[in-house]
Image: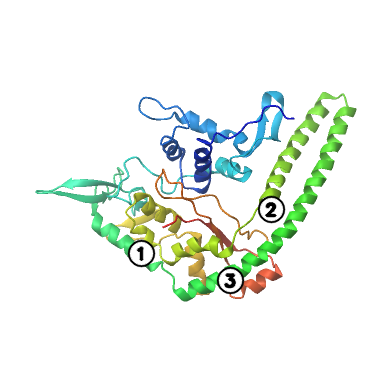
């Protein structure tokens, strides 16, 4: 037996899982957004204002125990695989640690509302700082405006009518809609790449299992050396090496488990992604502010600079739209066989904070016109590959 084993709390486990996966995927772009999400539940004790202290959130996402591993420095335990059920994958936990270093692209604010969906995302064309917004009082009613509030900027306090800036944005968004022919061609290309990669994953599974056996042999060798030596510095060096091997094994075991999971049907995985790519406008006209903000995060890779006289500057679109544009323009690059995985991505539900809906992701790959054939050849070169996860609508 293993003695007492941790078991998930059914009333809180799903919420914690949503929090981790939402932050890892970008649904929550800052810890503050994650904190607000947890404040809608009873996962943590809240103060009189109904708020959770930020340090509690920091402590939560640092705990690797949620990924099924145990680490405890006082006892010299480092990433030991536990016997308890994991709430999230090790990959998700690592992604969360990496995400903490990334600056939010379109962070949610407490004062966001349906009146100004572009607030914080559109920037001033002169100083590149995010526009703020306000209602200006007229003689008989109030009028909505966006404006630059950065002191020292030549456009400081110069306002732009909401109708003007949002109508120009909608025009820009509509131009991103690809043709049906282009979507059909892309879907056929991705289907063949998907099938090819599934075959590669089967080979990768065998290679991963072989690497784990090699690490087990190395681990046994270092343990034997520790027993044979009395030198404290040598023992410390061996222990560090053992710790490193254990981390490598943990990552490989996670990879092996993931490769054994069912990957679902191609059409099911790609359906929602291609629906969004076909017409992002459908999500933008939603009544939910969460959906409209989702469009900003999914379509554009950076904030949009805007100048009252010149309109929007060149928009940096996200990889899905950039890939379709490059295919349409005939741009191409060779695609390496490695790295094109038909992964089921983390949940990235951009609907309301209380929503439990989720969507599987899709991996889109850009290559030459005869990409499926070249992908089979496995020639090495640069490539564009991306992950896209879209909300249900």
- The disc, 3 or 2, on the residue closer to the chain's N-terminal end is 3
Label 3 packing within 10 angstroms: few (<14), some (14-19), many (20+): many
Mark 3 sits on what residue?
189
Mark 1 sits on what residue?
172
Which of the 4 image quadrants contains residue 251? top right
Task: Indicate which label's residue lies in the foreground, 2 or 1.
Answer: 2
User: Which residue appears farthest toward the left when viewing the image?
Assistant: 139
* 197 left or right of 47 in image: right
Vertical order, 54 against 304 (above or below): above
Q: Residue at x 37, y 62 (%)?
A: 282
* 171 left or right of 89 in image: left
**Image marks 2 and 1: residues in contact by CB distance under 8 Å:** no
Q: Residue at x 29, y 50 (%)?
A: 116
Identify the secondary structure beneath mark 3: helix
Identify the secondary structure beneath mark 2: helix
Mark 2 sits on what residue?
260
Identify the secondary structure beneath mark 1: helix
Quarter of the image for the C terminus: give it.
bottom left
Label 1 packing within 10 angstroms: few (<14), some (14-19), many (20+): few
The CA span between labels 3 and 2 is 25 Å
Position in image of residue 338 (x %, y %): 68, 60
Task: Indicate which label's residue lies in the foreground, 3 or 2.
Answer: 2
């Amino acid at each position: 037996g293993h003695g007492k084993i941790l078991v998930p709390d059914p009333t809180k486990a799903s919420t914690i899982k949503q929090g981790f996966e939402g932050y890892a995927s970008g649904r929550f772009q800052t810890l503050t957004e994650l904190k607000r999400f947890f404040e809608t539940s009873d996962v943590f004790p809240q103060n009189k204002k109904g708020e959770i202290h930020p340090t509690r959130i920091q402590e939560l996402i640092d705990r690797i125990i949620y990924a099924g591993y145990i680490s405890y420095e006082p006892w010299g335990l480092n990433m030991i695989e536990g016997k308890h059920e994991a709430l999230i994958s090790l990959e998700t936990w690592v992604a969360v640690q990496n995400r903490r270093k990334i600056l939010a692209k379109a962070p949610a604010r407490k004062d966001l509302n349906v009146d100004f969906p572009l607030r914080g995302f559109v920037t001033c064309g002169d100083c590149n700082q995010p526009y703020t917004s306000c209602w200006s009082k007229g003689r008989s009613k109030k009028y909505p405006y966006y404006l630059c509030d950065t002191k020292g900027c030549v456009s400081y306090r110069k306002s732009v009518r909401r109708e003007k800036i949002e109508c120009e944005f909608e025009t820009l968004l509509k131009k991103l809609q690809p043709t049906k022919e282009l979507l059909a061609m892309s879907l056929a290309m991705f289907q063949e790449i998907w099938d090819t990669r599934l075959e590669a994953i089967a080979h990768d599974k065998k290679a991963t299992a072989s690497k784990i056996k090699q690490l087990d042999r190395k681990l046994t060798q270092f343990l034997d050396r520790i027993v044979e030596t009395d030198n404290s510095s040598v023992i410390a060096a061996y222990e560090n090496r053992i710790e490193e091997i254990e981390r490598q094994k943990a990552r490989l075991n996670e990879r092996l488990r993931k490769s054994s999971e069912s990957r679902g049907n191609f059409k099911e995985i790609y359906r929602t992604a291609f629906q969004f790519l076909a017409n992002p406008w459908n999500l933008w006209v939603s009544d939910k502010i969460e959906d409209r903000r989702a469009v900003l995060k999914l379509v554009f890779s950076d904030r949009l600079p805007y100048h009252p006289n010149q309109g929007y500057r060149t928009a940096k679109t996200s990889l899905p739209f950039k890939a379709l544009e490059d295919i349409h323009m005939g741009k191409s690059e060779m695609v390496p066989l490695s790295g094109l995985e038909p992964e089921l991505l983390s949940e990235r539900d951009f609907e309301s904070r209380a929503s439990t809906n989720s969507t599987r992701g899709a991996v889109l790959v850009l290559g030459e016109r005869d990409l499926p054939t070249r992908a089979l050849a496995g020639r090495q070169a640069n490539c564009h590959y991306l992950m896209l996860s879209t909300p249900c609508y």
